[in-house]
Image (cartoon, helix red, strand yellow):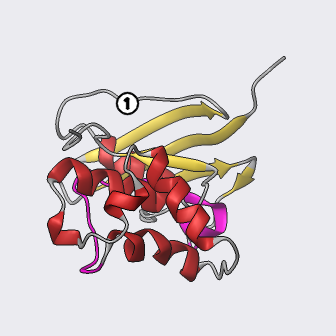
Amino acid sequence: MAVESIYELTNVALHYGKGFSLGIPHLVIRKSVATGLMGPNGSGKCTLLKILSFLETGYEGTVRFNGSVVSRNVLPAEQNVTMLLQQPYLLKRSVYENVVLPLNFRGKRRHIREEVFSSLRLVGLSPNSYAHRQWNQLFGGEAQRVSLATRLVLKPNVLILDEPTSNID
């Protein structure tokens, strides 16, 4: 049984001035498969992740997602794709308020507390111990886990991780 692709990139190129350029003649990423990127600093890994996350639109070539050509103005939320950056970014509020925010943006109104607590458990944080804590009461690894929980609470089709083990305790 063949595995379907979630992404297919053809002749994708991105140029930054006269310096760095990214060139991908052809790349297929399969559904339900964990895929890793390796390469030296400055080789374009983060740029490629931004293209796959629909955060970078200044490229040439074709990107297909679930078989359809991606429009340059597609929003990551429209495809249910989310990216966790290397440095955790939390708003100046409680852990619970950070994790619930994406659900509020999506208009989810039912079972919110259960979804937030489930997401915290997925990243190894006890909801009873962490939900009430403020963002500035977290250590680096805890903040990274909360950042991951804010992505997982959405149950994304694609979760893109940039340096996923940085800051993890």
Q: Is residue 48 left or right of residue 40?
A: right
Task: Compare residues 159 and 104 and report the one nearer the observer.
Answer: 104
Residue denoted by label 1: 37
Q: Quadrant of residue 155?
A: bottom right
Q: Quadrant of residue 111?
A: bottom right
Chain part drawn in magenta: 73-93
Task: Compare residues 160 and 151 and report the one nearer the observer.
Answer: 151
Task: Compare residues 3 and 68 and report the one nearer the observer.
Answer: 3
Residue 125 drawn at (x, y percent): 37, 50
Classify the position of the N terminus by image quarter. top right
Secondary structure under tag 1 reads loop
Q: Give the residue at x 45% y 37%.
A: 24
Q: Is residue 51 left or right of residue 162?
A: right
Residue 65 drawn at (x, y percent): 66, 50
Taking the view exactly as shown, the residue that stands out farthest to the right is 1
Q: Is residue 150 left or right of residue 107?
A: left
